[in-house]
Amino acid sequence: MTRIAPPQSFNNRIFLALVHYPVYNKEGDTIASALTTIDIHDFSRIARTYQLGGVWIVTPLKSQKDLLGRMVDHWTRGFGATYNPNRKDALEVLDVADTVDEMTGKIHHATGKDVKSVATSARSFPHSIPIPILSETINQSPDTFVLLFGTGWGLSETLIEKCEWVLTPIRPYGYNHLSVRSAAAIICDRLIGEE
């Protein structure tokens, strides 16, 4: 669906993943959640604004991938491409995978670099790391990094356990129910900061 920029700088060695499976529903069951077009647009705009390597949508559901394909076609090749060229530019950093493992394999193949996964969560975990530590880690590493953002009620713990790191929540106390696109923007800004 898109191109992946070869890693050259701090920023474009970072990818975002909007994960729709495996995530939890309100009852704590593992599910595949539905795509939300505003999240897809906003994740793409975040990636373009911060000059990241790209955005991945992770869903095994054919109906959701078909919906994503129609939306992206409208804004990149259809009427939307001329109506709103900025949105076209943003959505050109987007790709899709059935699973997180498939996504990391494709990033590795395209970049030739090892891929390190970083889970994000509104929940606290004993081994969570703060954003400045992640920033320092990325600076000192030649690898690519993918930040996993869960939809629904968050990433499943089985997926989180497979990641190299888990970020400390943005607000590790009290009310902590930001939209996933807001959380992604805050984390990217704190991670990359001023140039």
Image: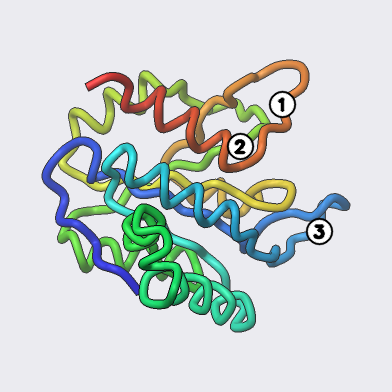
The foreground one among 128 and 121 is 121
Query: Is the C-beta separation of discs 1 and 2 under 8 Å?
Result: no
The kind of residue tagged 1 is: Asn
In the displayed structure, would residue 56 be above or below residue 186?
A: below
**Residue 37 relative to residue 52: left or right:** right
The residue carrying pointer 3 sits among few (fewer than 14), some (14 to 19) or many (20 or more) residues within 10 Å by Cα, namely few
**Residue 165 relative to residue 113: left or right:** right
Q: Position of residue 149 (x, y in %)?
A: 54, 46
Circle 1 residue: 176
Q: Quadrant of residue 11?
A: top left
The kind of residue tagged 2 is: Ser
Q: Quadrant of residue 195?
A: top left
User: Which of disc 2 and disc 1 is earlier in sequence?
Assistant: 2
Circle 2 residue: 121
How far is disc 1 from disc 3 in space, using C-alphas?
Answer: 21 Å
Q: Nearer the viewer, mark 1 or mark 3?
A: 1
Q: Quadrant of residue 87?
A: bottom left
Label at residue 29: 3
Q: Residue at 74% across / 61% down in the picture?
A: 30
Instruction: Single out the residue that lies furthest toward the front.
Output: 83
The residue carrying pointer 1 sits among few (fewer than 14), some (14 to 19) or many (20 or more) residues within 10 Å by Cα, namely some
Q: Residue at 65% across / 27% down in the picture?
A: 124
Query: Is the C-beta separation of discs 1 and 3 under 8 Å?
Result: no
